[in-house]
Image (spheres, rainbow, N blue to C red):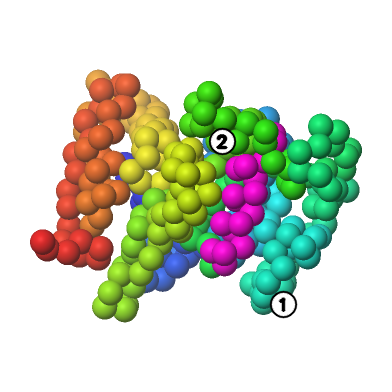
Amino acid sequence: RYVFLTNGGGAHEDAKVASLSKRLGLSVDEDVIRDRVILSHTPMRGWADEVKKQTVLITGSHPETARKIANEYGFERAVTPADLIHANGDLYPFDNLKDTLHSEFRPLPDGKSASAIKDPYSKSLAGNALKIDQILVWNDPRDWSLDIQVIHDLLVSHNGYLGTLSSKNGNRGLPNNGWQQDGQPELWVSNLDLVWKTEYPVNRFGTGAFLEALKGVWSAVTNGAELHYNALGKPSQFTYDYAHTRLLQYYSTMKGSREVGGRKDATPLRRVYMIGDNPESDIRGANEYCPEDGTEWVSILVRTGVWTET
């Protein structure tokens, strides 16, 4: 029983399976990977239907690709930064890669507008004002400037309405001095890896680096308020819970076939070995994870990839 748990993302699981099979030189008949790859954003597949029906902002290395994957996961109302800047050029009045990275866009859902708000503190909101319920950082964004601007705008908004400003911002009588206390969308980051290994001799920045940049801007804007966000990917418990559930499902399938032959196992899982090269994600996640069923997770560090001797 095994799964491949990676903080990689931005592609569909089937694409990752094909890539990994090719790198390992596996034939089509050697089906040892399919349905066993868990990407950084794969746990979103298991989110409740009521969440998937909300309007979400999705960003990542290739936002349109991320949106197509999100649609396949069941997110029906996914918006990208490209949609916003094509709907309202004033939102980001700089060189915004409209003809390259952001050339693919769609109309906003249900006839909503990115320019409906004229007064950010108005108590009366236009019926076509765009409201974002969740912000999903799918994987490492390419246009940090635009994405940080849009995420900032939503996190300082009233109830997630684009173009508004919350009257609670900076209120010292509220938790976190009023920041993110007015129904703003939840921020989800699917991978906290600061760096990752490539063929280049020095590690490259990952999604965690984007998050640190966002934190820096947020701290400057809010005079040091905490940025509230949720993390997926290793080492988050959300991801380890998802992986553990998948292992249990595989076990149940195997157990069923064994019982037909008269064999029964006493316990579902006794021990899981987590093998990885990143002390801050692979190893930390396994060391901190304690599933309710009592299964022991044991970490094994391999001295390759991201790992460096200190």
Q: Which residues are magenta?
A: 143-159
Q: CA distance from mark 1 to mark 2?
A: 38 Å
Q: Quadrant of residue 271?
A: top left
Three-letter code, disc 1: Asp
Q: Is residue 108 magenta?
A: no
Q: Quadrant of the N terminus?
A: top left
Q: Is residue 155 magenta?
A: yes
Mark 1 or mark 2: which is in front? Answer: 2
Q: Answer above or below: position of 174 versus 199.
A: above
Along the line of sight, the residue nearer the viewer: 232 or 225: 225
Q: Which mark is residue 292?
A: none
Q: How many labels were placed on the picture?
A: 2
Q: Is residue 35 visible?
A: no
Q: Which residue is mark 1?
A: 99
Position of residue 157 measured from the top left corner of the image (x, y, whole percent): 67, 41
Q: Which residue is mark 2?
A: 170
Q: Quadrant of the C terminus?
A: bottom left
Q: Residue at x 60, y 50 (%)?
A: 151
